Image (cartoon, coloured by chain):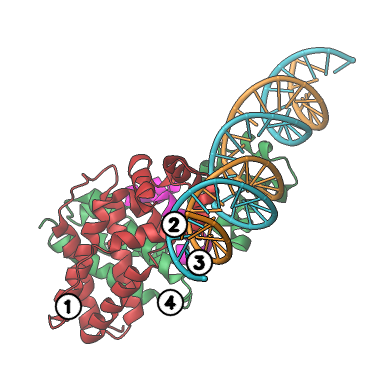
Chain colours: A green, B red, C cyan, D orange
Amino acid sequence: MLTAARDLVAEQGADGLSMRAVARRLGVAPNALYSHVAGRTDLVDQLLDDMLAGVRTPQPGADPVAGIETIMTSTYRTLTAHPELVPLYLQRQGARGPNAVALGEVLDALLARAGVEEVPDARRALIVHAIGFAAFAGSDVLPADMPVTAFTKSLRWLLTGMTKAPTL
Amino acid sequence: MLTAARDLVAEQGADGLSMRAVARRLGVAPNALYSHVAGRTDLVDQLLDDMLAGVRTPQPGADPVAGIETIMTSTYRTLTAHPELVPLYLQRQGARGPNAVALGEVLDALLARAGVEEVPDARRALIVHAIGFAAFAGSDVLPADMPVTAFTKSLRWLLTGMTKAPTL
DNA sequence: CCCTCAATTGGACGCTGTCCAGTTTAATTG
DNA sequence: CAATTAAACTGGACAGCGTCCAATTGAGGG
C-alpha cells in the first residue's frame, strides 16, 4: 500500500495522492484502506517517514558539528531524490513518524554536544532550511540537480552562527 | 471579498478557506465569487499578494546589503503578523501577484548591486528563509513573538555568504 | 465442520472546486 | 425617463474528495 501511494505520487505529484486513487490502483474499495491506515494524514505521515529511513546518521563518537552536517546533508539528498514528496512535507510542516522522531533525537543530542543553547529553535531552523532548500531545488527555474555544495554552504553559515553566538 | 477571505482565515485557519465558506460569509451563492476571481488559487494568490503590500522597501540609494536586510526583515514581520497565512504561502511556494513580482525585482536589483552572482538562487534562498522562519515562528513550541533579532541573525549569515563567496 | 476475526464491500453523508444556463441588478447611453 | 448593455448573481448540477456504518466475504484455528 505504501508502494502504491509512492508510485502514485511519483506519477501524478502530491496532489494526485488520494485515498480513492490509492484504492483504485490496488483494485480495492476505498474503505478497505482504513483497515491498514487511520486516514489520509496517517498515510502521508507513513509515506514521509518511510523515506526518512534512508537518512544517514554519523558515528556516535564523531565531531558533533560534522555529525549535524552529515545528517542534514543526507536529509537534503533524500528529499531532493524524491522531489514530489517535498510539497507533502511543507503541508505537514515536517514528518512525525518514528524515523523522524529518531532523527530529531540524534539531532538534538548533537546540538547539545555542540554547545547550542536553544536546541529546539536550532533543530527547527535546520529542518526548515533543509526542507525549504529542497522545496525550491525541485522548482521549475532551477535544474533539479542543483549542486549539494550550495546547500552545504548555507548550512555551514547556520551552523557557524548557532555554535558561536547562540543567544543574541 | 478579500476582506471576507482574510477574516475567515484569521478565524478558522488556512484550512477554513473555501470558496463556499467565503460565499456563505458574504451571504451569496458560491458561484457568484467566480465573477470576481478566477478560482480558489487566484483568491489565495490575491490574499497573499495583498499582504505583501505592507512590506517596506529601502531608499533607492542605500547600501544594497542593508536594503536586502530591510526588505527581508519587513517581509518576515509581515508574515509573522498574519501567521494563519503562512501555510498558504508554503502550499503555493510563495506569492505570485504584482506586489510579489515588484518585491522580487527590487530584491534582484539589490542582489546584483551587492555583487551576488547567482541572483535567482539567492533570491529563492532569502524567500525560503523568511517563509520558513515564519512557518516555525508561529508554531506551538515557540512563543509567537519570537524576537526579530533571531531572524536577522541567520539572515546575516546568509547575506555574508552570498556576498563574499557566491560560487563554491 | 463451525466459529472467529480480520479484510473487504456497497452505500451513503457532507464536503469541496468548478461549470453552464438563465436571471436579476446596476450602469450607461440615447 | 426609457432602453440597452454589462456585470453580478442564482439554481442546479458534475465529479471528486475523506470518512463512516452495517453487512459480507475469506481464511485459519479449535
Residue A94 sits inside the magenta stretch = yes
Classified by dominant secondary structure, the portion drawn in magenta counts as: helix
Pointer 2 and pointer 4 on the same chain = no
Segment tinted magenta in the rendering? A79-106
> Residue A165, how many percent across, how many down?
12, 61
Query: In this figure, which residue is indicated by the disc labeled 3?
Result: A81
Name the residue type under label 2.
Leu
Query: In this figure, which residue is indicated by the disc labeled 2?
Result: B43
Which of these two is toward me, B158 or A147? B158
Q: Residue at x 51, y 43 (%)?
A: A41
Secondary structure at badge 3 equals: helix
Secondary structure at badge 1 equals: helix
Name the residue type under label 3.
Ala
Label 3 – label 4 distance at C-alpha: 11 Å
Q: Which residue is drawn at 46% across and 42% down?
A: B21
* Location of residue A2 with respect to A130 vertically, above or below: above
Name the residue type under label 4.
Met
Name the residue type under label 1.
Val
Q: Residue B65 has which mark?
A: 1
Query: In this figure, which residue is indicated by the disc labeled 4?
Result: A146
Which of these two is toward me, B99 or A108? B99
Label 1 – label 3 distance at C-alpha: 34 Å
Secondary structure at badge 2 equals: helix
> Residue A59, how many percent across, how many down?
35, 58
